[in-house]
Every structure is written in C-alpha cells, then in structure tokens.
Amino acid sequence: MITTPFTARATAAEVLTGTDLSGRTVLITGGSSGLGRETAHALADAGADVTIAVRKPVASPTQVGRTARIRQVELDLADLKSVRRLVEHWNRPLDALVANAGIMAIPTRRVTPEGWELQLATNYLGHFALARGLHSHLAHAAAVRGEARLVVVSSGAHRNAPIDREDLQFEYRAYDRWAAYGQSKTADVLLAVGAGQRWAADGIVANALNPGFINTGLQRHVDDDTMRALGAMDEEGNLIEPDYYKTPAQGASTSALLAGSPLVAGVTGRYFEDNQEAAVVADGGHGVAPHALDEATAEWLWLYASRDLD
Ligand SMILES: NC(=O)c1ccc[n+]([C@@H]2O[C@H](COP(=O)([O-])OP(=O)(O)OC[C@H]3O[C@@H](n4cnc5c(N)ncnc54)[C@H](OP(=O)(O)O)[C@@H]3O)[C@@H](O)[C@H]2O)c1
C-alpha cells in the first residue's frame, strides 16, 4: 500500500510544499470551478505551466486564477468533436492530464449524439477520448522526463455501481441518476487501470481518486431531501457542512498529489483517497470496490469505448 505523510485535511498547496514543477505542463478539465480550480492553482503555484479545459472560456485570463501561468482552452466533454478539436490543437509535451470535470445525478436519462448516457459520456467517455488522443504528448513528456501522469477524479459513489456490460447506457433497465453517476465513476477508475496496463512501457502512470465530500457546484442536481439525508442542508433549506466535509482546497489535495508529487513517482493503476492508497473493500462504505479494479472489465471497457472513437 502506498502511504504519504498527508492527512485527509491537507490542502492541495500543502501536499506540493517544496515541490518545483517548473517546466512541467499540466492540463486540467473543469479547471474553472470547484476542485479543478483549486488543483490548477496549487499546481501553477508550484511552478507548472497549467492549462484548464473549460466549456465556457472567460473573457479575461485574470479572472481564471491567481497566477499568470494558467491558460484556458475550450472543451465540451460530452461532444467528441470538441474533444477532437482540443487534441488536434495540442502541440506540446504533456506531463500530467487531470481528468477532473464531472456532472452528477442528472434527473432524467439524456444521451449524446453518439448514444451515450450523459453522465457516462461526460465523466468517462470524453476523458477516455481526451487521454487516448493526447497519448503521444504524454509519451513525449515521459521520454524527456522519465514519467508522465494521468489522474482521474472518481468518487466513492463508484462502490454502488459496477459496470453493467449488458446495459451500459440504461437502454433496458430503468434509469437511476445515482446508478448512472456511480457507474460513470467506476468507469473512471477502470480508465486508470486500463491506461496503467497499456501505457506502462511508455512511462505513463495512471491513478484514480476519490476527493471526499465537498460543497461545490456538483450538487446542483441533488434534491433537497437527499441533501438533508446527507446532513448537508437544514430544514429551512440552508446549506450546512457536516464535520466530514472538506474545503475545496482540501478536496483537491489528492489530485495535486497524484499529478505533481514525487512521493507517488512510478505508482500506477491504483485508487487513492485522503492522500493515501485506499484499501480494497468488498461491501464497505469506504475504500475501493474490487469491481473498479478488475483488469478484465478495464480491458472490456477500453475496447467498447474505442469502437466509438475509431
Ligand atoms: N464535490 C464532491 O463532493 C465530489 C465528491 C466525489 C467526486 N467528485 C468529483 O470531483 C470532480 C470535480 O467536481 P467538483 O466537485 O469540483 O464540481 P464542480 O464545481 O461542479 O466542477 C465540475 C466541473 O466540470 C465541468 N464540466 C461539467 N460538464 C462538462 C463538460 N461536458 N465538458 C467540460 N467540462 C464540464 C464544469 O464546468 P461548467 O462550469 O461548464 O459546468 C465544472 O467546471 C468531478 O469529477 C466529481 O464527480 C466531487
């Protein structure tokens, strides 16, 4: 098991203290809000040349971040044409790709033009296409510096939802917003497992993580009753933060660690939470479920998704 000195309460800046990322190039999806923004700032403050990939670029770069080093590119993960455009325009070695953007609990089943259920398309397929498309740039960086990194932001919600190989897109079973989110987050872990296997010889490591619970824009589709059941809303509808909630800066720490810290150099195909590798737990409320680390399912999913990209 990989361990680090950092607790669940460490911030993204703290896990990178003393780390110099000058000359490293990092691309972060969903980097204009929530955990992505905190991850971008921490990596940029450590010296990295950070680009955020966002649906709606802002007019002035000064609105993007605290440092001048953060650039932005346009990306809609639910639109494969948009992913292809970013890939075609990318022209530099890439030291780390942080697949962070996501949506959660979309109330009704929606599909992309390719027929993918929207949460799976956004959280998984778009990131798969992006990582695959940028593979040569990751490999180039790895050839120069010995290693490049793919970091995939998953969620503890993966534990409730294995991949349903018979009905990945909720075409035959009843759509369930949480099952769809959970399955997309299992797919995210399997993306790291698959890339870890396939790209090891290229010097590319890939890991997934659960950031914990953090109040961000992600909860916008969660109804009030569910928020109350989570302890995140009072009877009057005010947002409250239970003790186990983290700040965005704390929630971004495991992403920053995996993208930039020398403490995890060479580590691949694993799932982290609270800045530690998580235990494999079959039926628990914590850790990583065996179905998310299953190499055969990772291979099946890789081939299934590749069919829509080739
Ligand atoms: N917050 C938590 O408690 C928690 C827990 C477990 C896992 N996570 C994971 O953490 C990651 C970050 O979430 P967050 O909490 O920081 O939520 P957030 O503030 O809502 O950030 C999500 C980001 O994803 C972007 N995004 C959504 N759909 C996109 C698309 N089609 N193309 C490109 N970008 C898109 C959003 O951009 P727009 O502004 O354009 O919508 C936003 O910048 C997600 O993968 C989420 O599943 C969060």
Image: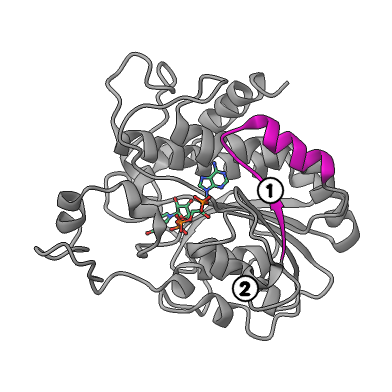
Colour basis: one colour
Q: Is residue 54 depicted above or below 160 in this figure?
A: below
Quick one: 133 or 87, which is closer to the camera?
Answer: 87
Frontmost residue, 16 versus 220 = 220
Task: State the extent of the magenta-drawn residues as a range.
Answer: 71-89
Check the picture and name the quadrant holding the C terminus: top right
Which quadrant of the view contains residue 92? bottom right
Query: Is residue 240 highlighted in magenta?
Result: no
Q: Farthest front residue? A: 59
Q: Is residue 72 magenta?
A: yes
Horizontally, residue 30 falls left or right of residue 23, namely: left
Q: Which residue is mark 1?
A: 74
- Along the line of sight, which residue is nearer the eye, 34 or 10? 34
The tag on residue 157 is none
- What is the three-letter code of the residue carrying label 1? Glu
- Indicate the position of residue 1 as horizontal and vertical percent values: 51, 62
Q: Amino acid at mark 2?
A: His
Query: To which residue does mark 2 refer?
Result: 41
Earlier residue among tags 2 and 1: 2
Report which quarter residue 211 is drawn in.
Answer: bottom left
Q: Position of residue 155 (x, y in %)?
A: 41, 51
Task: Decide if residue 133 is on the left or right side of residue 41.
Answer: right
